Image: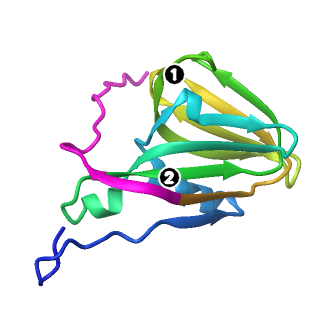
């Protein structure tokens, strides 16, 4: 995107903290359709941290006509258990992140679920909701906005 002088307008780096479900909803919206390599996700049990690096599609800039992705880091603290389904941890595979939600348990604990397309998911059991997201790398243009196939739902 160009400003009035014709110079490229650099997007500010996104840095967000999560301390409640509303904060997590904001992060989920920013990471919708991010791509994540399975090898760029890790659980670090000694520090009780789950971290990943994603290629985030910049939805707010897309509303202004730019189509870009950027490298983004996300980490969750106070994680005591990680469960995955729909993929092998050792696979050289790229997953498409659809949403991240928090389901409360006995306060302040709960479960964070990262849902990916194709039925894959990661469930983090956490002591409390504490996370942070930061843009950490370059931006690059992409040809198209991410899209999803329409699904017809039959109501009983």
Q: Secondary structure at mark 1?
A: helix
| Viewer-nearest residue: 64 or 92 | 92
Is 153 within the magenta? yes
Q: Is residue 28 above or below residue 95?
A: below
Other-residue count near label 1 (Cα within 10 Å), few / some / many at <14 / 14–19 / ≥20:
few
In the image: residue 59, left or right of residue 7: right
The circle drawn on residue 119 is 1
Residue drawn at (32%, 26%), measured in percent from left and top? 151
Residue drawn at (73%, 26%), measured in percent from left and top? 83
Q: Is residue 7 above or below residue 147?
A: below
The circle drawn on residue 19 is none
The circle drawn on residue 72 is 2
In the image: residue 31, left or right of residue 65: right
User: Residue 26: x, y in percent?
Assistant: 53, 60
- Location of the N terminus by quadrant is bottom left
Where are the magenta residues, as a range? 135-156
Q: Secondary structure at mark 2?
A: strand
Residue drawn at (37%, 22%), measured in percent from left and top? 154
Q: Is residue 105 above or below residue 39?
A: below
- Location of the C terminus by quadrant is top left
Q: Residue furthest bottom?
A: 5
User: Residue 108: x, y in percent?
Assistant: 85, 55
User: Residue 122: x, y in percent?
Assistant: 64, 31
Q: Earlier in the sequence, mark 1 or mark 2?
A: 2
Main SS of residues in magenta: loop
Q: Is residue 35 above or below residue 15?
A: above
């Amino acid at each position: 995107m160009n400003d009035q002088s014709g110079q490229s307008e650099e997007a500010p780096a996104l840095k967000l903290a999560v301390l409640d479900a509303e904060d997590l909803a904001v992060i989920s919206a920013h990471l919708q359709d991010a791509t994540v390599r399975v090898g760029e996700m890790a659980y670090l049990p000694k520090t009780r941290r789950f971290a990943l690096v994603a290629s985030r599609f910049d939805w707010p800039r897309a509303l202004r006509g730019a189509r870009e992705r950027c490298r983004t880091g996300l980490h969750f603290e106070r994680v005591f258990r990680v469960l995955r389904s729909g993929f092998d941890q050792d696979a050289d595979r790229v997953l498409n992140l659809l949403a991240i939600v928090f389901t409360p348990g006995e306060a302040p604990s709960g479960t964070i679920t990262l849902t990916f397309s194709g039925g894959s998911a990661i469930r983090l059991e956490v002591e409390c909701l504490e996370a942070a997201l930061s843009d950490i790398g370059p931006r690059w243009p992409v040809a198209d906005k991410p899209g999803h196939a329409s699904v017809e739902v039959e109501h009983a």
